[in-house]
Amino acid sequence: MKVAFVVGFFNPVGSALQDAFEEQLDGGTLICVSKTSSRYPFDVNKFKSQLFQKATAMEIDSILVVAADLRGQEWLTSSLQQMVDAARDRSDGKDIQLVLCKDAQNPAPVIESISAFGLVVSGECGGEVSESDLIAYRQLKKVLCVRGKNQSGFEDALRRAGFQFANFEHHFVEVPLSYGSNVGQTLKESAKHHICLLYAWGELKYLQPATKTKWDNLHQGENPAAAVARFKQAIQGEAAGKKDKSPKES
């Protein structure tokens, strides 16, 4: 089993991790020790205790530590390296890595490091999604699918995930974009015309809070398949909830 730590970053990174890795945070395979003040470091003792605990746990074979490397706190970076080295010595040969990021408020390199490590959302919900459930979920508006220009398309990802529909264009609008400052503005404007957004952030900017608040129904991931996995979970959850609330036969 793999475990990742994210330490020393500010709240924007923690919020982004909650969106991208909710299952891992809830399951304890991703542990976030945030920085709450620019004047003081994160809870170093808490991190050290948890790191050593995971390093000696039998079921864990590799650990990633992603840490903010801030100017003026070089002593802390040095201490982190010593902790990681000590954890590796205690772990009886486990793979324990330290990755440093210069910007404590930018979630993109943190998420990229975690994804490269292999701690990704599985999103493997069983079964199919019927066209009628898809229609009920999206109501009368088409779902907007946004990805980088070099990423694979959403239609293939949806069909591989078990979505049943005759015509992709009846339900979805796909927009490939290039990385740039206009991504956020494009998505803000699009929220006026679509009820739901599938967003693959791998080649694009990670969504800022001002953009995310425009969308009540947002499913994002590093690539189209990851975004579709979250979309599928939401549709199946809603369909199951409606089934549970339906009148029972006497």
Image (cartoon, grey):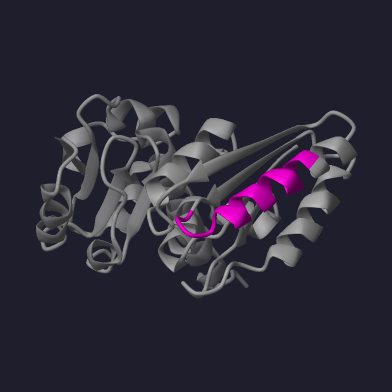
Q: Position of residue 162 (x, y in %)?
A: 44, 33
Between 228 and 109, which is closer to the camera in this rendering?
109
Q: Is residue 100 left or right of residue 105?
A: right
Q: Residue at x 68, y 52 (%)?
A: 79
Q: Is residue 128 visible?
A: no
Q: Is residue 32 left or right of residue 106?
A: right
**Could you tell me what secondary structure mostly forms the magenta stretch?**
helix
Q: Position of residue 104 (x, y in %)?
A: 44, 57
Q: Position of residue 221 (x, y in %)?
A: 40, 43
User: Which region shows up in magenta?
Assistant: 70-85
Between 132 and 195, which is closer to the camera in this rendering?
195
Q: Work out which quarter of the rendered image holds the N terminus and state it.
A: top right
Q: Is residue 74 above or below residue 161?
A: below
Q: Is residue 231 left or right of residue 58?
A: left
Q: Is residue 217 above or below residue 21?
A: below
Q: Residue at x 37, y 35 (%)?
A: 223
> Does the magenta segment cover residue 26?
no
Q: Residue at x 24, y 42 (%)?
A: 145
Q: Is residue 71 visible?
A: yes
> Does the magenta segment cover residue 73?
yes
Q: Position of residue 85 (x, y in %)?
A: 76, 39
Q: Is residue 4 left or right of residue 51?
A: left
Q: Work out which quarter of the rendered image holds the C terminus and state it.
A: bottom right
Q: Residue at x 29, y 27 (%)?
A: 151
